[in-house]
């Protein structure tokens, strides 16, 4: 029974990774050919991994690299945050300034991703990465504005086109997975979308795009 459950979890992990790759490449193509690519609403009011309020207005005149994910993710999110961290380290080693740019990891799982949990997760990566969590209703607006699909992978109680309806009422176990689109958003200091890169992007490409907005 335990072996069967383990095999099922492995299949679920693989399915989520494949979904993230396909969704990421699909959306990156959509944005690259869309006249509305710079119309993303950047406003937010969230809580950082130190438990402090952080609003989009606090990051005015800053370039931004943003990734959405959750700390209990087995593969996609750790790999993606590690790539972001490696890019930061490369820039630091190149003696380039990072004063005008912020790196954000925004949760898709506020039910479990408290500020404390975000701090624990991010402790393995470059400290310049800021974890953002907050109330479900606040995060839902951000997901919608960024076209991020979010859904507990083993929940059958909600419409897959809308993601969570009411996170507080999700009837899933504590080890549930979260389906979510996975890509990096890069914005200039004027909050214009510079690039959107899907999961699977190489460190070289991510680094090149980050340097464009320094």
Image (spheres, rainbow, N blue to C red):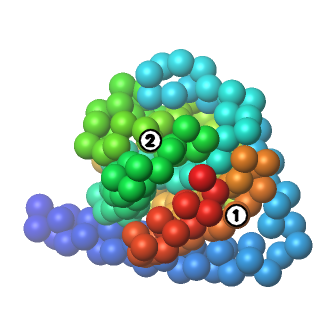
- Residue 192 rendering spot, x and y as whole percentages: 78, 56
- Image quadrant in which the N terminus is located: bottom left
* Residue 88 in view, yes or no: no
Give the side of residue 136 with respect to residue 154, left or right. right
Residue tagged by mark 1?
194
Q: Along the line of sight, which residue is nearer the eye, 101 or 175?
A: 101
- Residue 43 rendering spot, x and y as whole percentages: 76, 38
Q: Residue at x 73, y 35 (%)?
A: 60
Dot 2 alpha-carbon crowd within 10 angstroms: few under 14, some 14 to 19, many 20 or more: many
* Residue 94 in view, yes or no: yes
Give the side of residue 171 with respect to residue 148, left or right. left
Q: Residue at x 36, y 37 (%)?
A: 127
Number of dots carrying numbers: 2
Dot 1 alpha-carbon crowd within 10 angstroms: few under 14, some 14 to 19, many 20 or more: many
Question: Please, what secondary structure does the residue beneath circle 2 have?
Answer: strand
Q: Along the line of sight, which residue is nearer the eye, 137 or 95?
A: 95
Residue 129: assigned label? 2
């Amino acid at each position: 029974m335990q072996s069967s459950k383990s095999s099922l979890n492995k299949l679920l992990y693989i399915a989520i990774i494949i979904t993230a790759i396909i969704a990421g490449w699909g959306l990156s193509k959509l944005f690259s050919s869309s006249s509305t690519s710079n119309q993303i609403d950047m406003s937010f009011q969230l809580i950082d991994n130190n438990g402090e309020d952080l609003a989009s207005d606090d990051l005015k005149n800053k370039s931004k690299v943003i990734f959405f994910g959750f700390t209990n993710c087995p593969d996609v999110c750790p790999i993606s945050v590690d790539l972001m961290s490696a890019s930061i380290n490369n820039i630091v080693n190149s003696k380039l300034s990072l004063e005008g740019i912020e790196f954000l990891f925004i949760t898709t799982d506020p039910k479990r991703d408290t500020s404390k949990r975000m701090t624990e997760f991010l402790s393995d990566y470059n400290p310049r990465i800021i974890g953002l969590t907050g109330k479900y209703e606040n995060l839902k607006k951000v997901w919608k504005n960024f076209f991020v699909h979010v859904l507990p992978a083993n929940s059958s109680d909600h419409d897959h086109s809308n993601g969570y309806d009411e996170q507080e009422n999700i009837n899933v176990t504590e080890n549930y997975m979260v389906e979510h689109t996975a890509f990096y958003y890069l914005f200039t200091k004027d909050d214009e979308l510079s690039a959107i890169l899907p999961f699977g992007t190489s460190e070289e490409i991510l680094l090149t795009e980050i340097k464009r907005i320094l």
